[in-house]
Amino acid sequence: MRPETEATAERVFVALADPSRRAVLAALAADGPATATDLADRLPITRQAIAKHLALLAEAGLVIAEPGERRRVRYRLDSAPMRVAQQFLAALSRDWDGPLDALRRHLDG
């Protein structure tokens, strides 16, 4: 696995480790692009906390900040880093499938 792939996957996993960040991502996925204020109106999280979560999600590449009207920044999802993390997990899974199958055969035999 390439180092940049592992680094991207790590940033995604760190971002997804927090339930509040997962809630922010779920809200963006369900309702489309939104500002931090919009998200604070929908979630039981303060606007300041949402802004911090959005910064980390942007650092992980999971959201993109887009300038809007009157200096309001809207955030939208970017699924590319998530696909990299999925590929990382799939590669790990393939690496484990053979040894686990061999162990199962050994234990069954």
Image (cartoon, grey):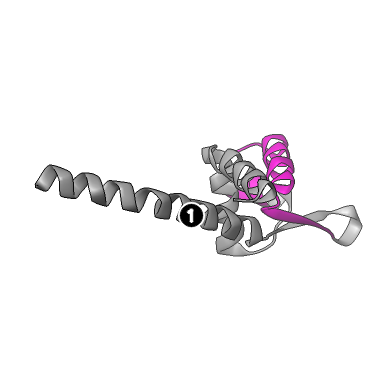
Instruction: Give the quarter of the image for residue 54.
Output: top right
Instruction: Give the quarter of the image for residue 72.
Output: bottom right
In the rendered structure, the answer to whether residue 109 lies left or right of residue 26 reads left
Which residue is identified by label 1? 91
Closer to the camera in the image, 106 or 48: 106
Name the residue rendered at 54%, 47% in the picture: 23
Magenta region includes residue 51: yes
Amino acid type, mark 1:
Ala
At which x and y percent is residue 100? 28, 47
Mark 1, Cα crowd under 10 Å, few <14 / some 14-19 / many 20+, is few
Name the residue rendered at 67%, 60% in the picture: 78
Regarding residue 43, the answer to whether it shows in the image is no
Magenta region includes residue 43: yes
Regarding residue 53, the answer to whether it shows in the image is yes
Closer to the camera in the image, 50 or 63: 63
Stretch in magenta: 39-67
At which x and y percent is residue 90? 46, 56
Name the residue rendered at 51%, 39% in the picture: 19
In the rendered structure, the answer to whether residue 60 lies left or right of residue 71 reads left
At which x and y percent is residue 105? 17, 50
Closer to the camera in the image, 25 or 17: 17
For numbered disc 1, what is the local secondary structure?
helix
Closer to the camera in the image, 48 or 9: 9
Q: So how many labels did they put on this image?
A: 1
At which x and y percent is residue 9? 60, 47
Name the residue rendered at 25%, 51% in the picture: 101
Q: Residue furthest right?
A: 70
